[in-house]
Image: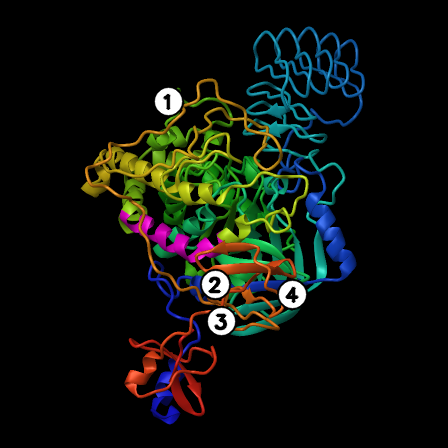
């Protein structure tokens, strides 16, 4: 077979193999389709001084709070409750000392005691609170009094849920009249003064917020190529993720270049959850449905030749995304609603949702759509300017996935984008940050207080889940759910069902398992990717395997999360029964059996705590009556295991090696050890492993395969060259102007 006989085939040949059939080709940027069958290496380089400072900033503040995401109290917030380190007396008789607050009471607190209308201020410590009761909180970092007679004793941050004035230094106002302004945190969620969350003062105690390097370069080893970029911004990302050992980053390619259709990326370790699957699965669900959304896949990160771990990489709804996806150059119509309390009203969101184009000063079009929503009585009142169906799909997703960190509960982590006219010209909701979905840390749905006594969260109805006041939810769903029910069914029928999602989870697990294993295996006493030196918690390989199946991880783990498949199965059953859908009897059968790994299984936390000890050294607050084991149907006779296994070949990226070039590890994306490096550090089914330059390398030589192409009259390629053509016989390369079979 001569090369010239297949010119037509070569026109369509591609180095990468077929994309997943889970998502229709064309529903994502080319980059994410390419990454379906390989995990590329992203290699960032920067000057030594910036590299040292970046590493320092990653660990700055340890497990403390960082103000990036929760700094919005003034944007629509109230005016009272401000103040930093100093006594305040707002109408009372005696002012506070060293941060004591007295707002109408008789005696101010000392060293952070608070008295807001009661008789006696807090006593000692950093923050006793009295918000309308008789006696203020006593000692510690934040007593709690929510309208009762006696303030709380200890804790991290006081709460006011229904009072008039918000506090600072960790004070919370949820539903009161005035939000907190400055200081170490005040929350106002839905009160008259607007404002939403304000974590203002938890600024990491000295670290710079959003530290980034603006003079970095990058090489991406992908699709058999090396893509080089001379100018990139690379910086720390996330907010609560800053408390974890594994960190998050943001990446922007500067200038006119892009990476297969994308320029800006969110690089996330998703350290909150055990599986590396929740964000990916959420994006895949959106992409499969073909609705406007971001996409996700996987990457390995190297910074100045140090291996920094395995990550989920997602695009970001920024102006560059709008241009590359919709041809909307320099758009002025993307508003990012990252602060809590953005319920799509003028009072909550007009100035709290920020335009992603920094040059925009006129926000009248944004106020107009919010005003229309405020005055709307039904879908027909906003249908001409607001994508109602897209919004309903997002609400259906939030309910089915158990999302508490988006619109229905926290009212943040979404962007609003006005599509170009050729795409309908309507305002469209684009959600992001999915690591807390599918039953992860689900007790946060009760952030503002207990919703119901039954804490079996997968069995909650939509009205249980949508328990916060949202005018737009009232008019589009609660007043008449006919349209919403049709969309819920469409989502269940096409994607949110066990048959579809269980297979996808199995496929993804087999694909990423070697990379997860690499991240879970210590090198020189610490696991790769655990960059925050002041945090130590991390999930084990056993927890990864178990939680991505049916096993719940409890409060003894780094965080609390339902088993991924367990959540999907039980929320599917609930939705099918709730809306009387005709669903798959195999999975509706309560005797459908699944394995639970009792060696790592633990009780789901049902007591919401603001301790946020997931990433640091502490634990979540223990619930009063923990459920020690999760339910499990009786095992049928002859049963072996519900886990499916596959044989998956992982396409290796371009990897440099100065020595052995035919080791078994190359098939899994790792370099081979130099010939003189024969020290075995680790062994598994792949073979012997060593360490070079702070990264794993393979020692065991690859078994020499037989030449399958000989029976077809061709020789095999002498090297692992590029895949030029793929057919039913195998992968073909080219040598000496003739076809050859690839065996590696």
- Residue in the picture at 64% in, 54% down: 360
- Sequence-first disc among 2 and 3: 3
Judge whether 60 appears above or below 267 on screen.
above
CB within 8 Å, label 2 to label 4 = no
Which residue is labeled 4 in the image? 254
Q: Which mark is residue 6?
A: none
Find the distance from the CA under tag 2 to the CA under tag 3: 15 Å
Q: How is the image coloured?
A: rainbow
Estimate the spatial distance between the alpha carbons at disc 3 and disc 4, rounded to whole Å.
22 Å
Q: Is residue 69 magenta?
A: no
Q: Are marks 1 and 4 in contact (CB under 8 Å)?
A: no
Q: Do we see residue 495 in this rendering?
A: no
- The residue that disc 2 covers is 668
Locate residue 603 relative to residue 580 in the image: left or right: right
Which quadrant: the N terminus? bottom left
User: Crowdedness of circle 1 by 10 Å Cα count: few (<14), some, many (20+)?
Assistant: few
Residue for badge 3 = 223
From the viewer's perspective, is 707 left or right of 140? Answer: left
Magenta segment's dominant SS is helix
Residue that numbered label 1 is attached to: 454
Callout 2 crowding tier (Cα within 10 Å): few <14, some 14–19, many ≥20: many
Q: Is residue 477 visible?
A: yes
In the image, which is nearer the foreground, mark 1 or mark 4?
A: 1
**Percent of width and height locating residue 647:** 35, 60
Q: Secondary structure at mark 2?
A: helix
Q: Magenta stretch: residue 503 in it?
A: yes
Q: Which residues are magenta?
A: 499-516
Task: Identify the residue at image location x=74%, y=45%.
Answer: 208
Q: Is residue 207 left or right of residue 427?
A: right
Instruction: Give how far across and how far down residue 28 sits, in percent.
Output: 43, 62
* Cα–Cα gap, marks 2 and 4: 31 Å
């Amino acid at each position: 077979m001569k090369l010239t006989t297949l010119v037509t085939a070569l026109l369509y040949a591609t180095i990468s193999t077929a994309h997943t059939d889970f998502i229709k080709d064309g529903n994502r940027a080319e980059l994410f389709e390419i990454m379906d069958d390989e995990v590329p290496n992203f290699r960032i380089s920067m000057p030594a001084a910036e590299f040292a400072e970046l590493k320092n900033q990653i660990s700055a503040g340890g497990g403390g709070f960082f103000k990036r995401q929760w700094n919005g109290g003034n944007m629509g917030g109230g005016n009272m409750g401000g103040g930093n380190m100093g006594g305040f007396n707002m109408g009372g008789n005696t002012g506070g000392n060293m941060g004591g607050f007295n707002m109408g009471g008789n005696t101010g607190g000392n060293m952070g005691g608070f008295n807001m209308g009661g008789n006696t201020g807090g006593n000692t410590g950093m923050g006793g609170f009295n918000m309308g009761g008789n006696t203020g909180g006593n000692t510690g970092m934040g007593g709690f009094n929510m309208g009762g007679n006696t303030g709380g004793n200890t804790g991290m941050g006081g709460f006011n849920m229904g009072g008039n004035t918000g506090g600072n230094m960790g004070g919370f106002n949820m539903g009161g009249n005035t939000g907190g302004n400055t200081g170490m945190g005040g929350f106002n969620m839905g009160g008259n003064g607007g404002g939403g969350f304000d974590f203002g003062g938890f600024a990491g105690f000295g670290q710079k917020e959003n530290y980034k390097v603006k003079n970095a370069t990058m090489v991406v080893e992908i699709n058999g190529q090396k893509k080089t970029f001379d100018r990139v911004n690379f910086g720390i990302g996330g907010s609560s993720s800053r408390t974890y050992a594994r960190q998050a980053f943001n990446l922007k390619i500067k200038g006119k270049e892009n990476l297969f259709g994308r320029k800006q990326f969110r690089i996330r370790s998703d350290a909150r959850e055990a599986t590396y699957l929740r964000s990916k699965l959420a994006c895949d669900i959106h992409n499969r449905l073909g609705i406007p959304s971001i996409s996700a896949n996987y990457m390995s990160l190297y910074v100045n030749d140090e291996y920094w771990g395995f990550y989920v990489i997602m695009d970001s709804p920024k102006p560059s995304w709008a241009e590359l996806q919709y041809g909307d150059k320099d758009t002025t119509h993307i508003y990012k609603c990252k602060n809590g309390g953005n319920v799509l009203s003028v009072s909550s969101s007009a100035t709290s949702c920020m335009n992603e184009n920094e040059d925009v000063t006129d926000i009248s079009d944004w106020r107009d759509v919010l005003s229309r929503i405020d005055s709307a009585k039904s879908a027909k009142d906003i249908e001409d300017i607001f994508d109602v169906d897209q919004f309903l799909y997002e609400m259906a997703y939030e309910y089915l996935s158990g999302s508490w960190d988006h619109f229905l509960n926290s009212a943040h982590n979404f962007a609003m984008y006005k599509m170009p006219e050729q795409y309908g010209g309507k305002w469209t909701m684009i959600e992001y940050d999915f690591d807390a979905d599918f039953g992860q840390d689900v007790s946060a749905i009760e952030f503002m207080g207990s919703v119901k006594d039954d804490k079996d969260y997968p069995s909650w109805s939509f009205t249980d889940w949508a328990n916060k006041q949202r005018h737009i939810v009232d008019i589009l769903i609660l007043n008449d759910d006919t349209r919403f029910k049709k969309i819920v069914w469409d989502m269940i029928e096409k994607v949110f069902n066990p048959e579809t999602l269980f297979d996808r989870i199995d496929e993804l697990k087999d694909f990423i398992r070697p990379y997860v294993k690499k991240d879970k295996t210590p090198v020189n006493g610490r696991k790769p990717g655990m960059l925050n030196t002041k945090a130590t918690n991390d999930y084990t390989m056993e927890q990864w395997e178990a939680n991505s199946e049916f096993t719940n991880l409890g409060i003894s783990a780094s965080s609390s999360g339902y088993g991924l498949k367990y959540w999907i199965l039980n929320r599917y059953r609930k939705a099918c029964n709730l809306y009387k859908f005709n669903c798959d009897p195999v999975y509706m059968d309560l005797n459908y059996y699944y394995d639970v790994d009792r060696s790592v299984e633990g009780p789901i936390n049902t007591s919401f705590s603001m301790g946020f000890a997931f990433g640091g050294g502490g634990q979540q607050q223990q619930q009063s009556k923990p459920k020690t084991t999760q339910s499990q149907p009786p095992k049928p006779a002859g049963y072996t295991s519900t886990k499916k296994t596959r044989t998956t070949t992982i396409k290796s990226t371009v990897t440099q090696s100065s020595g052995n070039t035919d080791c078994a590890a190359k098939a899994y994306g790792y370099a081979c050890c130099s010939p003189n490096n024969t020290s075995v550090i680790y062994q598994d089914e792949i073979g012997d492993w060593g360490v070079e330059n702070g990264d794993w390398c393979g020692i065991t030589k690859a078994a020499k395969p037989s030449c399958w192409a000989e029976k077809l009259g061709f020789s095999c390629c002498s090297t692992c060259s590029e895949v030029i053509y793929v057919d039913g016989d195998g992968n073909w390369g080219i040598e000496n102007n003739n076809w050859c079979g690839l065996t590696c």
